[in-house]
Structures are given as structure tokens and as C-alpha cells.
Amino acid sequence: MPIIYIDADACPVKAEVSRVAARYMLNVIYVSNSWMRIPDEGEREKLVVVGDNPDEADDYIAEHAVENDIVVTADIPLADRCVKAGARVIAPNGRLFTDENIGEVLASRNLMSELRETGLMTGGPPPFGKKDRSQFLQSLDTVIQGIKRGM
């Protein structure tokens, strides 16, 4: 069965992942730059604390996630690395990153970053809400079912 890796520093769906993982008896690894409380410190869930370098958590996840593992992250470059490794990647709002869409998502992210740097665009993503949480749960369940069916 897959392992679920969570880019945990700013992840708003840790408790949801914990509940779903318990239902399917999956292991969860929360990767963070600092110690944090995780939803269930049982034998199936653990926290990995890496160094202070902002990319260390991403590097850990990208180096460990393999085909059919599940990665939860909003970090597009990390999503790109994990998709290329064969992992299933889900953003906290439920968006799936796939071979088919990751190139476009990465290009869009880079364009938006440039627009923010030049001052042509300000602000960030909309606030995280109940609809995002619900969509995430639906996407996570769909991905796990797909892995179980060999899809």
C-alpha cells in the first residue's frame, strides 16, 4: 500500500489525511522544518523534521516518494518532482497534479510569480474554506481507491 507524504509546514488538511489514512490503514509521514504536533502519533503516523533550509522538506519528500505513493502539497515545483517519480499528488484544495497537467500548472505558477515580482499583480490565493476541504477529501479517497484497483 502507498505511503502518504505531507508537506506539513503549512498544510491545512493534516487531520483529514489522518482520518482517511486510519480508515485505509495507510502510513503517513509528515515532513516539516520544525517540530509540530501531528494528529495521531501512532505507529502508522510519524513526523520527520529536516533542517532549516526551506527546500529540505521538499527534497526529503521528492527523494522518498515513489510510484503510487501519495503526496499532499501546494508547492508546484515539489508536485512536479513527485509526479515525475510516479507519485500521486494532491493539493490541499483537492486539485490533482498529473503528467497531463503539471507542465501547464508549473508554467502558470512561474508566470504568476513574475507578474507579482513586477507589481502587475498583487495578492495570493483565495482563503482556504470548507469547499476546499471537502474537495480534498473526495480527491484523496478517489486516488486511494484508484491505487487499490491498480489504476
Image (cartoon, grey):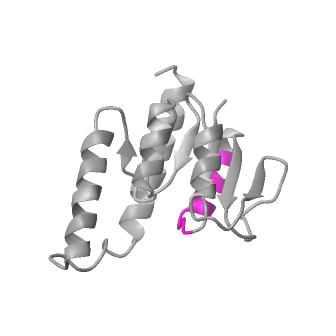
Does the magenta segment cover residue 18?
Answer: yes
- Left or right: 90 as drawn, with respect to 109: right
Query: Looking at the image, which residue is at 57% across and 58% down?
Result: 55
Q: Main secondary structure of the magenta part?
A: helix
Query: Looking at the image, which residue is at 70% across and 50% down?
Result: 29
- Left or right: 49 as drawn, with respect to 5: right
Tell me which corner region of the image, top left, top right, bottom left or bottom right, holds residue 48: bottom right
Q: x and y percent of residue 10 in the render?
A: 54, 69
Q: Residue furthest right?
A: 43
Q: x and y percent of residue 98 in the render?
A: 37, 36
Q: Nearer the viewer, residue 52 or 139?
A: 52
Quarter of the figure with the N terminus: top right
Q: Which residues are magenta?
A: 10-22
- Residue 66 vertical placement versus 15 (above, below): above
- Residue 98 vertical placement versus 16 (above, below): above
Query: Looking at the image, which residue is at 57% across and 65% down?
Result: 54
- Residue 34 vertical placement versus 145 (above, below): below
Q: Residue furthest top?
A: 150
Query: Looking at the image, which residue is at 23% across and 80% down?
Result: 122
Q: x and y percent of residue 119 in the render?
A: 19, 79
Q: Residue furthest left?
A: 120
Can you see residue 22?
A: no
- Left or right: 112 as drawn, with respect to 55: left
Does the magenta segment cover residue 1?
Answer: no
Can you see residue 70?
A: yes
Q: Nearer the viewer, residue 95 or 10?
A: 10
Q: x and y percent of residue 32 in the render?
A: 66, 62
Q: How many numbered badges does the structure rendering display? A: 0
- Residue 138 vertical placement versus 55 (above, below): above
